Image (cartoon, rainbow, N blue to C red):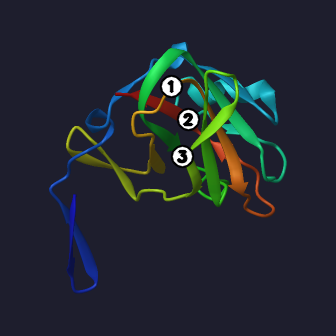
Amino acid sequence: YQVQTCGLCRVYTDFRGGPEQAGSPLPHSSLQVSVSHHPHDAATLADGILTHRWRSHQAQEEDMWIQLDLPGPTELARLRFYYNEYPFDHADAVHILAADRDGGWQPVAVDVPVDIKGFDVVNGHPVYGWQVQDVPLDGVTTDRLRVEIARPRAGRDWTIGELEVYER
């Protein structure tokens, strides 16, 4: 999109992008989710219902993690976070790691600051109220992703409404 400042107002035009522009989403049912804290609700991170949420139920700590097991080795385009209704319960920065062939973890995006969009673009139209962030994964191929807190937000739970994985 483009932004023009007109006095005190900003005008947004030429909306492009959105989920259809950067890969295809993996089916929610194909993802297995595990978490380091409060595993009881882990499945809500990939259930396709944006109003459900997962929450750590304790203050954020460095190295808290969420793991997404994919259906098999997949070339990835991006990872999308939905912080809907909980825009303050995010970490200040996260690391995104991909599993390698030996079972270890390799960083693919390090110290990613939270950058929540003011709106999303769906079918060329702005959608307000969705607090989303997309992290490019640039064609990394893996069968597992891990999101780790790099810089916790003091005194806040870690709350995420949904995670979506997009393949190339």
State how far apart marks 1 and 2 are (Cα).
7 Å
Specify the farthest residue to the bottom: 7
**Of the numbered discs in the image, which one, if any, rests on residue 84?**
3
| Rendered image quadrant of residue 42 | top right
Determine the residue positioned at 40% across, 59% down: 118
Taking the image as shown, residue 102 lies to the left or right of residue 131, namely right
Mark 3 and 2 residues: CB-CB less than 8 Å, in contact? Answer: yes
**Where is 93 relative to 58, above or below?**
below
In the rendered image, residue 116, in percent from the top left (x then y), is placed at 48, 57
Q: Amino acid at mark 1?
A: Gly
Residue under the image location 42 percent in, 25 percent down: 75
Q: Which residue is mark 1?
A: 48
Q: Give amino acid for label 3.
A: Asn
Residue at 48% from the left image edge and 38% from the top image edge: 79
**Front position in the image: 145 or 33:** 145
Q: Are marks 1 and 3 in contact (CB under 8 Å)?
A: no
* 3 or 2: mark nearer the eye: 2
Q: Earlier in the sequence, mark 1 or mark 2?
A: 1
Question: Residue 83, image x and y in percent?
Answer: 56, 47
**What distance separates the C-alpha of mark 1 from that of mark 3?**
13 Å
Q: Which residue is mark 2?
A: 162
Find residue 7 and name its label.
Answer: none
